[in-house]
Image (spheres, grey):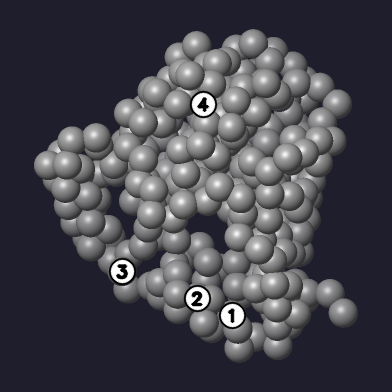
Amino acid sequence: MGLSLTTAGKWVERWELQQRRYAVDREDRFTVIADVVEHVTVGRTDRPVVVDLGCGPGSLAARLADRLPYAEIVAVDRDPLLLELARTHHPDAARYVDTVIGEDGWTRALALDRPLDAAVSTTALHYLGPGALRRVYRDVAALLRPGGVLVNGDHLPQHDSQLAELAACVGRRRAERQRAFAHEDWAAWWTAAAEEPELVGLLAERNGRQPATGTDSAARLSLSDHVRLLRGAGFRRAGAVWQYGDSCVVVAVR
């Protein structure tokens, strides 16, 4: 028995709320990502191809599909529970692919028939350590057409520790004013999801999968680290185009 629309809708809504605790001005960040993708694709092709890296339950893919209904969006994740929420709640937003970003053969799993116009990600790539991230950036650069972009919205601290502390404070105070911390956190969401009968099988499958190769949850690469890795991976230009606290949107141009 598949996941019901009602159940998927309930858990996606709770996901959207808990994510506000972590991404300062989350909706603005989504809008900026869509602005960039629209800017680099309009007038170049009638049907741009966009890959969403670490799509989760389809939050960014759905917003891009609303903004760019003519785009072909391929949404990628390794989490079977979040992917099923996306497929059920946002069935028409994207073509969903279950693969581990950065592992051997992951780009073949995308089944692309032409170069990418854009790759996007939000609050997903920070779990990769430097070596794995370098490989992913190289892989994405190889998939993009000349002039195509990688647009990454994530928590990217300043390299200088004192500036990083100040930026984190700015973001935290902003979240407090927006009452973002009134919502359940990441751990509480997963604990509650484990009590949902329709999610039990998906959660068991999730727990049975091995961690992704090359992950390093302790790695907190700075904004300048990401820019350096992107340039080393073959992107001509890279830098932040939006930032609030340590919540950034970084754009890299192929």
Marks 3, 1: nearer the viewer: 1
Q: Earlier in the sequence, mark 3 or mark 2?
A: 3
User: In the image shown, does 143 or 225 lie closer to the viewer?
Assistant: 225
Q: In this view, does 168 lie to the left or right of 231?
A: left
Q: Nearer the viewer, mark 1 or mark 4?
A: 1
Residue drawn at 62 percent across, 54 percent down: 212
Say which of 208 and 47 sits in front. Answer: 208
Q: Earlier in the sequence, mark 4 or mark 3?
A: 4
Relative vertical location of residue 86 with respect to residue 202 in this rendering, above or below: above
Q: Residue 113 carries which label?
A: none
Q: Choose mark 4 or mark 2, whichever is in front.
A: 2
Q: Look at mark 3 in the image and give the residue it sits on.
A: 181
How far separated are the C-alphas under marks 4 and 3? Answer: 29 Å
Amino acid type at image mark 3: Phe
User: Viewer-proximal residue, 160 or 152?
Assistant: 160
Q: Residue at x 75, y 21 (%)?
A: 115
Q: In which quarter of the image is the C terminus?
A: top right
User: In this figure, which residue is indicated by the disc labeled 1?
Assistant: 193
Circle 1: residue type: Ala
**Mark with earlier residue (1, 4):** 4
Query: Crowding near pointer 4: few (<14 within 10 Å), some, many (20+)?
Result: some
Residue 57, image x, y percentages: 63, 59
Circle 2 is placed at which residue position? 189
In the image: residue 25, left or right of residue 173: right
Q: Position of residue 7 (x, y in %)?
A: 69, 77
Question: Marks 3 and 1, Cα distance to the nearest angstrom?
Answer: 19 Å
Q: Given the image, on which type of amino acid does mark 2 rest?
A: Trp
Question: 91 and 232: which one is in front?
Answer: 232
Q: In this view, does 129 lie above or below 208?
A: above
Position above or below: 242 against 180: above
Mark 2 to mark 1: distance in Å? 6 Å
Q: Which of marks 3 and 2 is in front?
A: 2
